[in-house]
Amino acid sequence: MDNNLNVKILKSYVEIDKIHDDINNKIFNFITKANELVELSDNDYQIEKTLKLNKISLKGYVLDSDLCNQLSEINMNDYSINDLKNYFNQYESFSNTDYSNYLLALSLYELIEDIESKVNSKIELEINELSNIIQNISNIKNLDKNNYENSYYNFKNQLYSCFKEKKLDKNSYGICIQVLNDIFNFYISGYPNIPDEYLYHEEN
């Protein structure tokens, strides 16, 4: 039994689990603040199913503001989120208009980017850890989706061989399977979705 390998897997799993909890907390934080924006915008903004759709929706909501329309009229279309935050803050102070809804929308956009970044870090860490045990796992980034199933069983069989050869104990083997499933779920389904109960459902 390779105890060093098993200890390393356990330590990695603790780290992966921490990132996973952080992602879930950030998603919950997004949902809470996004609900605030739904109210502030009088339902102009609605929470979407995917992170990507929420980014598109938030961007559209902000660009539709009178400030962004004015910037567009004077051909100022190249600005960062931070620039835009500054513009809204400045405009708010001298026009005596409340732009908290648009500032909230911008912070939500940044929060989504933070969630995506965290998910990328977690998947990167998972691939790096499994690359010590599974050959060619890092190639998943370049795999054709049609080859996912064959590759999944190939990688799973490599883990099973390590378990049978007693390189992995039962606990480490279970962790590795869980991590492998997480990697493939990401490459098949992408970033986590917003749970259905938080989405807007029109009454019949």
Image (spheres, grey):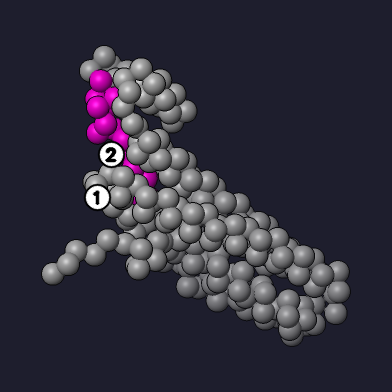
Instruction: Give the x, y percent position of residue 119.
Output: 55, 55
Query: For residue 74, which quarter of the picture?
Result: top left
Left or right: where 74 falls relative to 109: left
Does residue 62 belong to the magenta stretch?
Answer: yes
Question: Between residues 174 and 103, which one lies in front from this camera angle?
Answer: 103
Residue, disc 1: 43
Residue, disc 2: 60
Instruction: Give the x, y percent position of residue 48.
Output: 32, 55
The alpha-carbon separation of the residues under discs 1 and 2 comes to 14 Å
Task: Identify which amino acid the numbered label 2 is placed on.
Answer: Gly
Q: Main secondary structure of the magenta part?
A: helix
Seen at 43% across and 55% down, the residue is: 32
Answer whether residue 138 is visible to the viewer in this image: no
Query: For residue 204, which quarter of the picture?
Result: bottom left
Question: Between residues 190 and 56, which one lies in front from this camera angle?
Answer: 56
Q: Secondary structure at mark 2?
A: helix
Seen at 39% across and 21% down, the residue is: 93
Instruction: Give the x, y percent position of residue 141.
Output: 53, 55
Query: For residue 183, which quarter of the picture?
Result: bottom right
Does residue 115 belong to the magenta stretch?
Answer: no
Instruction: Mark 1 or mark 2: name the one nearer the start of the chain.
Output: 1
- Magenta residues (range): 52-70
Left or right: where 57 falls relative to 116: left
Task: Identify which amino acid the numbered label 1 is placed on.
Answer: Asn
Against 45, residue 97 (above or below) is above
Seen at 30% across and 50% down, the residue is: 39
State how many labels appear. 2
